[in-house]
Image (cartoon, rainbow, N blue to C red):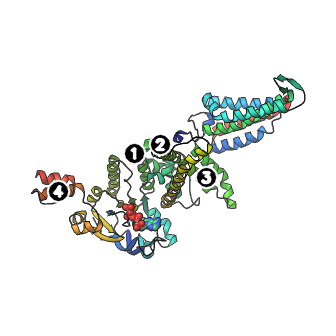
């Protein structure tokens, strides 16, 4: 059980437009894209948006194998959604598959729902594949910054995410170590669900204790380095929107616009 | 190298510290001492003698129950002094894993500089200079869990030194490192001292203590010795009281003296070689 090797934040370095665009813009675009998916009236529109997304991923040189691997869970969910509609929709029949009846409108609606689901997840995957996690949390903090006017702890929240990201690999490695240590002392990873839960508990408990003692030391180290909340703090990265961002925004808007218009016109 | 003419940069007056829920036992019982600017002071003592407590009192992470700690004349007990005190006194702890905050080496070195409110160009300039100086210049984009222990601790040191503290307090900074990294790290700290930084260095390695111009030895929260390491390691009563063991060179030279070799005790291996080959 190699937990430490699990990919956290599956960022893939590169220099494409998708990589270079401002992370704040990318997060905003993702939000718009996701909302727009629900305004697209037909499959044709979704297909246009999906094609645009895949084209962008191809230009960013993300291997299709990686895209497929990250979206496997949602593909399964999409398949279930599709079948559900296909077999249970009712109305005009398309044919029979053994004891099951296939419905024509079910195929259309199921395809539409499944595709929308896949695109929703794929757009999120695109963001995380082309943006370093550090930049993501940093950008989220900046996007939320205006909220600190109403006492929302925007900076602290972003820092929390940063620290969580920073410690997840260490904690997973620690879990590996504990599992090995306990296996060496004869603790088996017994079969069955209860067996597995029972085997995991002795791992989780030391892990929690470890992470809490870490937290205390971390707080002291942060305080020693003059940390006093977001107040009076500056940031290493100066983010400024440039020409690359204008191009990115234009293309993204065109894609979303095309999706909505075509979805409406085609009526399918 | 005590510079008595200048006012001390750190000054402890009758400092007592008690941890909550530890009854009447004081972790530190009435410490009084001065540290001048530019000094290198090694702090030694058995487990539980109060070294870490002393270190954490020096930048106001802990506050004395009685007495006071003055940093550059300002008391750590006054909350309004703490910002300035933490800018003056940089801290490095034992475990590098619990000191790295950010997701990359560069961002972590930047963390303290960002807290100081410096402009981005200045942050970038200082973080690159510090990273180069401590040999992590090539690793700026790397994630912390990717680094070796020695690289992590050098990242931590770079992050603290980039803030240009006048005093550096290190609490067993090399205890999680392998012997080679220990030597490298100790050399880095000494080079900072040569460049003018005041250093307070807590360590269990007597080889590191032996080369310090001044050492403090703690025993049960009290100051058992304050002076030159040579005077400490030749006193059996003090060794017994503090539970410390002299560095290997000293033990060898004593064994040699007992067997009729050179009588003058040696503190370091270099000295020992000199005595034996003279
Ligand atoms: N958080 C705490 N709460 C209660 N007691 C503590 C706490 N930290 C330390 N102590 C006690 O205070 C005394 C001094 O501890 P301190 O950590 O300063 O020793 P040390 O010299 O750094 O030891 P070591 O060599 O093990 O690091 C010890 O008796 C210890 O048990
Ligand atoms: Mg200690």
Question: Which of the numbered marks, if any, corresponds to residue B146?
Answer: 2
- Residue carrying label 4: B253
Residue at 51% x, 46% y: name it.
Answer: A175
**Whole-number angstrom distance, CA of label 2 to CA of label 1:** 15 Å
**Whole-number angstrom distance, CA of label 4 to CA of label 3:** 58 Å
The answer for which chain carries disc 4 is B
Nearer the observer: mark 2 or 3; the answer is: 2
Residue at 52% x, 42% y: name it.
Answer: A4
Q: Point out the image quarter for the N terminus of chain B.
A: bottom left
Decide if residue A132 is in sight here.
yes
Question: Which of the numbered marks, if any, corresponds to residue A158?
Answer: 3
Q: Earlier in the sequence, mark 2 or mark 1?
A: 1
Same subunit: marks 2 and 1 = yes
Same subunit: marks 1 and 4 = yes
Nearer the observer: mark 1 or 4; the answer is: 4
Which is more toward the observer, B12 or A77? A77
Taking the image as shown, residue B28 lies to the left or right of residue A207, namely left
Q: Earlier in the sequence, mark 2 or mark 4?
A: 2
- Residue carrying label 1: B135
Q: SS at mark 3? A: helix
**Whole-number angstrom distance, CA of label 2 to CA of label 4:** 43 Å
Nearer the observer: mark 4 or 3; the answer is: 4
Q: x%, y% of residue B172? A: 37, 57
Q: SS at mark 4? A: helix
Q: x%, y% of residue A214? A: 50, 56
Q: x%, y% of residue A27? A: 67, 43
**Whole-number angstrom distance, CA of label 2 to CA of label 3:** 22 Å
Instruction: Bin the neighbour count of mark 3 within 10 Å (Cα to Cα): few under 14, some 14-19, many 20 and up.
Output: many
């Amino acid at each position: 059980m190699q937990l430490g090797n699990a990919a956290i934040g599956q960022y893939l370095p590169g220099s494409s437009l998708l990589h270079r665009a401002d992370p704040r813009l990318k997060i905003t675009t993702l939000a718009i894209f996701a909302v727009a998916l629900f305004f697209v009236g037909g499959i044709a529109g979704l297909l246009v948006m999906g094609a645009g997304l895949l084209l962008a991923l191809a230009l960013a040189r993300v291997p299709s194998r990686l895209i497929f691997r990250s979206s496997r869970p949602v593909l399964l969910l999409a398949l279930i959604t599709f079948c559900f509609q296909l077999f249970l929709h009712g109305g005009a029949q398309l044919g029979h598959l053994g004891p099951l009846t296939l419905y024509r409108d079910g195929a259309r609606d199921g395809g539409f729902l499944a595709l929308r689901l896949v695109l929703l997840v794929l757009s999120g995957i695109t963001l995380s594949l082309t943006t370093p996690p550090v930049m993501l949390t940093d950008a989220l903090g900046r996007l939320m910054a205006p909220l600190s006017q109403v006492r929302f702890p925007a900076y602290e929240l972003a820092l929390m995410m940063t620290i969580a990201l920073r410690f997840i690999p260490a904690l997973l490695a620690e879990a590996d170590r504990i599992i090995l240590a306990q296996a060496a002392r004869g603790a088996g990873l017994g079969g069955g669900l209860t067996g597995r839960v029972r085997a995991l508990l002795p791992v989780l408990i030391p892990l929690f204790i470890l992470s809490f003692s870490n937290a205390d030391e971390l707080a002291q180290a942060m305080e020693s380095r003059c940390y006093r909340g977001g107040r009076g703090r500056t940031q290493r990265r100066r983010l400024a929107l440039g020409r690359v961002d204008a191009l990115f925004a234009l293309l993204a808007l065109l894609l979303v616009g095309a999706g909505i218009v075509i979805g409406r016109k085609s009526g399918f | 190298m005590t510079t008595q003419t200048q006012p001390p940069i750190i000054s402890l007056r009758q400092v007592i510290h008690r941890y909550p829920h530890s009854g009447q036992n004081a972790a530190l019982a009435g410490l009084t001492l001065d540290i001048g600017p530019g000094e290198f002071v090694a702090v030694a003592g058995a487990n539980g003698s109060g070294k870490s407590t002393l270190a954490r009192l020096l930048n106001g992470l802990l506050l004395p129950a009685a007495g006071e700690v003055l940093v550059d004349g300002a008391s750590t007990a006054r909350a309004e002094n703490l910002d300035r005190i933490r800018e003056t006194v940089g801290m490095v702890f034992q475990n590098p894993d619990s000191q790295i905050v950010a997701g990359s080496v560069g961002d972590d070195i930047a963390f303290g500089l960002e807290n100081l409110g410096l402009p981005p160009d200045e942050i970038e300039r200082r973080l690159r200079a510090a990273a180069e100086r401590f040999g992590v210049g090539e690793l700026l984009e790397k994630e912390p869990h990717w680094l070796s222990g020695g690289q992590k601790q050098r990242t931590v040191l770079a992050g603290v030194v980039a803030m240009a503290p006048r005093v550096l307090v290190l609490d067993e900074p090399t205890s999680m490192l392998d012997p080679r990294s220990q030597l490298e790290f100790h050399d880095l700290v000494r080079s900072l001292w040569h460049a003018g930084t005041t250093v307070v260095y807590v360590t269990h390695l007597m080889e590191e203590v032996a080369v310090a111009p001044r050492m403090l030895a703690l025993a049960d929260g009290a100051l058992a010795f304050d002076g030159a390491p040579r005077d400490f390691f030749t006193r059996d009563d003090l060794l017994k009281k503090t539970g410390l063991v002299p560095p290997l060179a000293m033990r060898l030279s004593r064994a040699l003296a007992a067997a009729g070799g050179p009588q003058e005790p040696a503190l370091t291996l270099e000295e020992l070689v000199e005595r034996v080959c003279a």
